[in-house]
Image (cartoon, grey):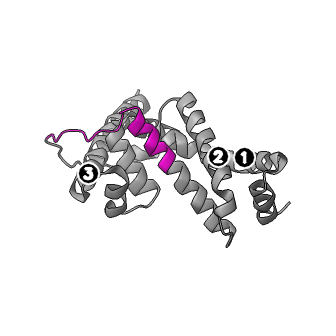
Amino acid sequence: MQLQQLIKEASQGSAAAQKCLFDELSGKLWPICLRYVKSREDAEEILLDCFFKVFKNLKDFKFINETAFHGWIKKILINECLAFLRKKNSFSIVSDSAAEEMALDEDMLQGLEREEIYRMILQLPTGYRTVFNLNIIDGLDHKEIASMLGINEASSRSQLSKARTLLQKMLLQKGIEYVKQRTK
């Protein structure tokens, strides 16, 4: 069944169409949840809340194309992630510290898998991780991030800079460990 028809039926309350939409889209949305929260249980709760909101508002959605639909759902999901973090009081701006920019040697990154980098991103403090995800991965600008998180643009920029610095330190450490393992 085509997506537009599936959306129409799901908006009319068809449980079968809603299940099909969930099955088709949840696999693509799941990794986004895990970028914002560490716990699989929390990610599952957020994903279900997202689909509840999607199905509730589907009748008001005007289908233009698949890309617009996927963007609409992704925006709902990100907002649900942020709402969850606010509810848990886990989003906070991390205080300023003297963070020095460090240059990375490209050779250090060669031995790292995408999964290792993903795990490093999850180790970032929630505020850093949230701004990093919104800007670097989701492509939002600092004005949008500031509005979504209730902070000013300078704080958003600062959080991103600190996230990058901390990631660089983690990557540098991982690179050193990798080089040591390679030379043994």
Which residue carries the number 3 mark?
161
Where on the picture, by quarter, is residue 142?
bottom left
Marks 3 and 2, Cα distance to the nearest angstrom?
Answer: 33 Å
Which three-letter amino acid code belongs to the residue tagged 1? Phe
Where on the picture, by quarter, is residue 173?
top left
The magenta segment? 79-97
- Of circles 1 and 3, the one toward us is 1
Report if the CB atoms under discs 1 and 3 are less than 8 Å apart. Answer: no
Marks 2 and 1, Cα distance to the nearest angstrom?
Answer: 7 Å
Q: Is residue 173 left or right of residue 9?
A: left
Residue 71 percent across, percent down from the top left: 58, 62
> Which residue sits furthest bottom?
64
Q: Is residue 171 visible?
A: no
Up-down relation of residue 121 to residue 63 (above or below): above
For residue 22, the mark is 1
> Which residue sits furthest left?
98
Which residue carries the number 2 mark?
51
Residue 23 percent across, percent down from the top left: 75, 45
Q: Residues within 10 Å of mark 1 (few under 14, many from 20)?
A: some
Which three-letter amino acid code belongs to the residue tagged 3? Ser
Marks 1 and 3, Cα distance to the nearest angstrom?
Answer: 36 Å
Q: Secondary structure at mark 3?
A: helix
Counting residues from the start of the chain, the first of labels 3 and 2 encountered is: 2
- Of circles 3 and 2, the one toward us is 2
Report if the CB atoms under discs 2 and 1 are less than 8 Å apart. Answer: yes
Q: Is residue 161 left or right of residue 62?
A: left
24 in the magenta segment: no
Residue 149 percent across, percent down from the top left: 34, 50
| Residue at image coords 47%, 57% | 138
